[in-house]
Amino acid sequence: MKITFTIVVNVLFFTILIFGLALSGLNLPTAAAQEVHAASLALQTTSTPLPQDASVIGSTDGILVMGIVIVLSATLPLLFG
C-alpha cells in the first residue's frame, strides 16, 4: 500500500511540474508581443572585418603526439597486463 501511494504521489508531482513548466512559457508580456519590428533597428550596418589567418603549419603535432601517448598508456596495460 505504501509503495502504491508513493508511486501515485510521484506521478502527480511530476505531472503538475511538467504542466506548470509548459504553461509558464506561454505567458508573454504584452510589451514583447507588440514590438515585432523593434529588433530590426539594432542590426549592424557595417561589414565585419575578415580575420587574419594566424594558423601555423604543424601546430597540432604536439596535441597528436600527446593523444597517442595517452591512448597507449591506457590500452597497453589492458592488453599485456
Image: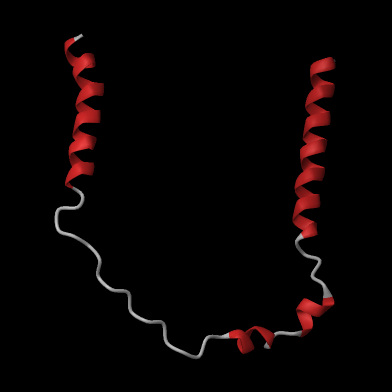
To which quarter of the image does residue 24 belong? Answer: bottom right
Q: Please, which residue is most extreme toward the top here?
A: 81
Q: Position of residue 32 (x, y in %)?
A: 76, 77
Tell me if 46 is positioned left or right of 39 in this view: left
Q: Position of residue 75 (x, y in %)?
A: 22, 22
Between residues 40 and 67, which one lies in front from this camera angle?
A: 67
Please give the name of the residue rendered at 19% of the width and 52% of the height, measured from the top-left corner: 59
Please give the name of the residue rendered at 22% of the width and 36% of the height, measured from the top-left corner: 66
Between residues 23 and 79, which one lies in front from this camera angle?
A: 79
Q: Quadrant of the C terminus?
A: top left
To which quarter of the image does residue 79 belong? Answer: top left
Between residues 80 and 57, which one lies in front from this camera angle?
A: 57
Q: Position of residue 60 (x, y in %)?
A: 20, 49
Tell me if 58 is positioned left or right of 12 in this view: left
Q: How many marks?
A: 0
Q: Is residue 22 above or below residue 74?
A: below
Q: Position of residue 61 (x, y in %)?
A: 17, 46
